[in-house]
Amino acid sequence: MALPVPVFDHFVVNVQERMDEAEACYRRLGFTLTPRGFHTLGSINHLATFATDYLELIGVPAGGAGRRDLMGWPVGLNGLVFGTEDADALCAALREDGVCCESPQSFSRPVALVDGTMRDAAFRTVRLPNETTEAGRLYFCAHATRDLVWRDEWRRHANGALGVARAVIAAEQPDVLAVLFSRLFGVSAVARSDDGYGLAVGLAEVAVVTPAALRHRYGTAAPECDGRGAWMAALELRTASLATTAAALRDVADVRIMGACITVPAAAAMGVALSFCP
């Protein structure tokens, strides 16, 4: 069976039991968020939906027992999710190639539409075990109801964000993740860079860089490692206009101009550095 083609589906920021704080934070950063969702798995979420991918804030209700697997990870960027059209075929292909993955899992959440009707958004995911990498969770998502996620009323953001151009992982041993990505997507999808490796994902990429390279690029805007040898650290988002981004972020403390980008430090974005770039 053919290995999957790397396609970004979404990016997950784990906020644990701090969803009210996270929602207010991301609205203040100029994102249009979907109404709060309640998964049949027990987790809760909000989405910032872009053209073809999205950013997900995920957590659990205060004192709730659902999704306790999320609580073992620090607050911050915690999941890179790739797309698939067929979760069962994907799982079979990964296992045939010797990649350990969990069996496909189906779940859903109700979605309130602007006309007042309710429908269930349905998903089927294939997850790599949490212990695969200390950087965070890696999995694939198949959508049965794409029309309930990518809706025009949720795709426009005051900060001008259009989509994710780069997800940045810091790793003391970048070659370990490079090998994993090569096994998932084939060796041709991964290329050596000056400070680590890059996984090509359409017109975007996952950059796996050394901690020194992360500090050089983001300085104190980058999140701390929390004792891990690898961690998901930053997202670089394409913006329609840096002037639009600057106007939306004018009241956010400690926003920085870094090269050609405007960067919100991790401390102001629930543990992930956000760079808006042309």
Image (spheres, helix red, strand yellow):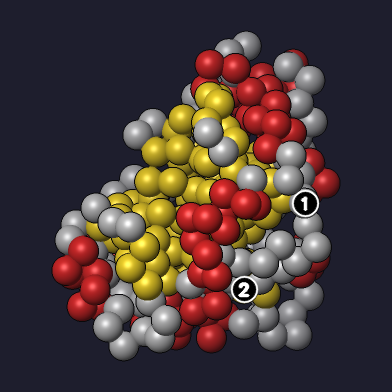
Residue for badge 1: 229
Q: Residue at x 57, y 54 (%)?
A: 214
In the rendering, which numbered label is found on residue 15? 2
Q: Nearer the viewer, residue 198 or 116?
A: 198
Q: Residue at x 58, y 13 (%)?
A: 2
Residue 256 location (% of width, % of height): 37, 72
Characterize the local packing of mark 1: few (<14), some (14-19) or many (20 or more) Cα atoms within 10 angstroms. Answer: some
Characterize the local packing of mark 2: few (<14), some (14-19) or many (20 or more) Cα atoms within 10 angstroms. Answer: many
Q: Nearer the viewer, residue 134 or 10?
A: 134
- The N terminus lies in quadrant: top right
Which type of secondary structure does the marked residue at label 1 adopt?
A: loop
Q: Nearer the viewer, residue 130 or 106?
A: 130
Which residue, as the protein is rendered here, is positioned at the far top? 1
Q: Residue at x 20, y 78 (%)?
A: 247
Q: CA distance from mark 1 to mark 2?
A: 21 Å
Residue 165 location (% of width, % of height): 38, 46
In this rendering, is residue 131 above or below 189?
A: below
Q: Amino acid at mark 2?
A: Val
* Residue 259 horizontal side relative to residue 125, left or right: left
Q: Amino acid at mark 1?
A: Gly
Q: Does residue 241 appear in the picture of this structure?
A: yes
Residue 30 location (% of width, % of height): 31, 75
Which type of secondary structure does the marked residue at label 2 adopt?
A: strand
